[in-house]
């Protein structure tokens, strides 16, 4: 049986461990590493197997894992991946891959040269909502995409410092950037504006409260992606992604729902919904809504797909290999560059 190890036993590590507990028929949970020994020991206790470590090199020497899940904060990438590659260990790395694109490129190329199977934590790609979303974008000429993600400030200390977290675009809203790429197409250029000064209750808070990005896509479509950490109640905003075509639209609430809105002729003045007349005015009409709902935890399939790929030696079913995940990181990093310079920035996907 193949051996699995983990580096990083914090919140995202707990998410993956909850999945691994259901995979013990196909993989051995052999080692758990964290700088805080109590966290690694808690994982061993919960798993009922494996050994706790505070040094991943020692874990690699003793366990000799076949695969590793790297679940560390954004600023910790680099040495871990290169050591993992040198030892020929297949790896799953949480997003964002790194905060330096040159570093991520070197990791990507070294892993491919070694022939390793890789994956990243874009579990939203494994949602059952993806297939109807892809189909909608194929069947309809999408003109405009409007994406919003508004929430609160996460509790982990490093997130509040943009220099080591990447900020909300890179660390959180990258899921929205990624799913737009995956179901619709590649970005060409971005222009991003940010604002600060609204979130006052945190000490050592050094990131953007809200930002808005204008995106030009390769297809010719345009979009806006807005994200904020200023909200304190769910009523502050209804976060979703809207894919708008000339006669229809679709609304995705990631890992929750996907609704397709189509027009049906109104039979009476009391009908609801809206259509556009030739003069641009809005009149009431009938709207048909086709609804899809999230089925289960997409992260289970995401994790198991990688594990099964390592077992079989075939990575073709992985939806988020390192090379493609790099493109989503590049998308978000271009936004940070635009915000810093006040200028539009080309998205370098390679």
Image (cartoon, helix red, strand yellow):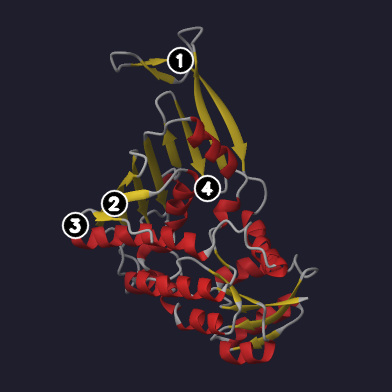
Q: Quadrant of residue 44?
A: bottom right
Instruction: Say whether disc 4 or disc 1 marks the residue closer to the N-terminus.
Output: 4
**303 shown above or below 98:** above
Q: Quadrant of the C terminus?
A: bottom left
Residue identifier under label 3: 342
Circles 2 and 4 in contact, beta carbons < 8 Å: no
Residue identifier under label 2: 190
Which label sits in the foreground, 4 or 3? 3
How far is disc 3 from disc 2 in space, using C-alphas?
11 Å
How far is disc 2 from disc 4 in space, using C-alphas?
22 Å
Residue 344 in percent (x, y) is at 22, 53
In the rendered image, is residue 233 in sight?
Answer: no
How far is disc 3 from disc 1 in space, using C-alphas?
42 Å
Residue identifier under label 4: 254
How far is disc 4 from disc 3 in space, using C-alphas?
30 Å
Q: Residues within 10 Å of mark 1 (few under 14, many from 20)?
A: some
**327 shown above or below 90:** above
Q: Residues within 10 Å of mark 4 (few under 14, many from 20)?
A: many
Q: Quadrant of the N terminus?
A: bottom right
Instruction: Say whether disc 2 or disc 4 marks the residue closer to the N-terminus.
Output: 2
Q: Secondary structure at mark 2?
A: strand
Q: Quadrant of residue 50?
A: bottom right
Residue identifier under label 1: 285
Residue 222 in percent (x, y) is at 32, 40
Between 201 and 73, which is closer to the camera in this rendering? 73
How far is disc 1 from disc 2 in space, using C-alphas?
36 Å
Residue 8 in percent (x, y) is at 56, 78
Residue 95 in percent (x, y) is at 48, 65
In the rendered image, is residue 138 in sight?
Answer: yes
**137 shown above or below 262:** below
């Amino acid at each position: 049986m193949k051996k699995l190890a983990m580096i990083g036993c914090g919140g995202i590590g707990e998410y993956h461990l909850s999945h691994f507990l259901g995979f013990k028929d196909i993989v051995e949970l052999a080692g758990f590493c964290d700088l805080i020994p109590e966290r690694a020991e808690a994982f061993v206790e919960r798993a009922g197997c494996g050994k706790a470590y505070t040094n991943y090199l020692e874990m690699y020497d003793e366990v000799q894992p076949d695969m590793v899940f790297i679940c560390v904060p954004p600023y910790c990438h680099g040495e871990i991946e290169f050591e993992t590659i040198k030892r020929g260990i297949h790896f799953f790395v949480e997003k964002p891959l790194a905060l330096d694109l040159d570093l991520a490129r070197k990791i990507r190329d070294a892993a491919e040269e070694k022939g390793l199977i890789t994956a990243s934590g874009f579990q939203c790609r494994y949602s059952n909502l993806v297939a109807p979303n892809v189909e909608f974008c194929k069947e309809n000429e999408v003109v405009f995409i409007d994406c919003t993600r508004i929430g609160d400030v996460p509790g982990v200390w490093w997130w509040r410092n943009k220099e080591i977290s990447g900020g909300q675009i890179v660390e959180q809203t990258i899921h929205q950037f990624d799913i737009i790429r995956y179901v619709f197409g590649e970005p060409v250029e971005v222009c991003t504006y940010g604002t600060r000064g609204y979130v006052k209750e945190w000490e050592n808070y050094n990131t953007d409260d809200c930002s808005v990005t204008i995106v030009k896509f390769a297809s010719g479509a345009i979009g806006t992606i807005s994200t904020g950490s200023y909200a304190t109640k769910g009523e502050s905003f209804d976060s979703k992604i809207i894919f708008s075509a000339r006669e229809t639209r679709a609304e995705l609430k990631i890992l929750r729902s996907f609704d397709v809105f189509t027009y049906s002729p109104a039979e009476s003045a009391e009908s609801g919904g809206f259509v556009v007349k030739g003069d641009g005015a809005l009149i009431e009409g009938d709207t048909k809504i086709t609804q899809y709902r999230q089925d289960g935890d997409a992260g289970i399939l995401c994790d198991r797909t990688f594990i099964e790929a390592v077992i079989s030696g075939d990575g073709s079913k992985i939806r988020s290999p390192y090379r493609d995940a790099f493109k989503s990181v590049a998308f978000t990093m271009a936004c940070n560059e635009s915000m810093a310079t006040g200028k539009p920035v080309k998205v370098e996907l390679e």
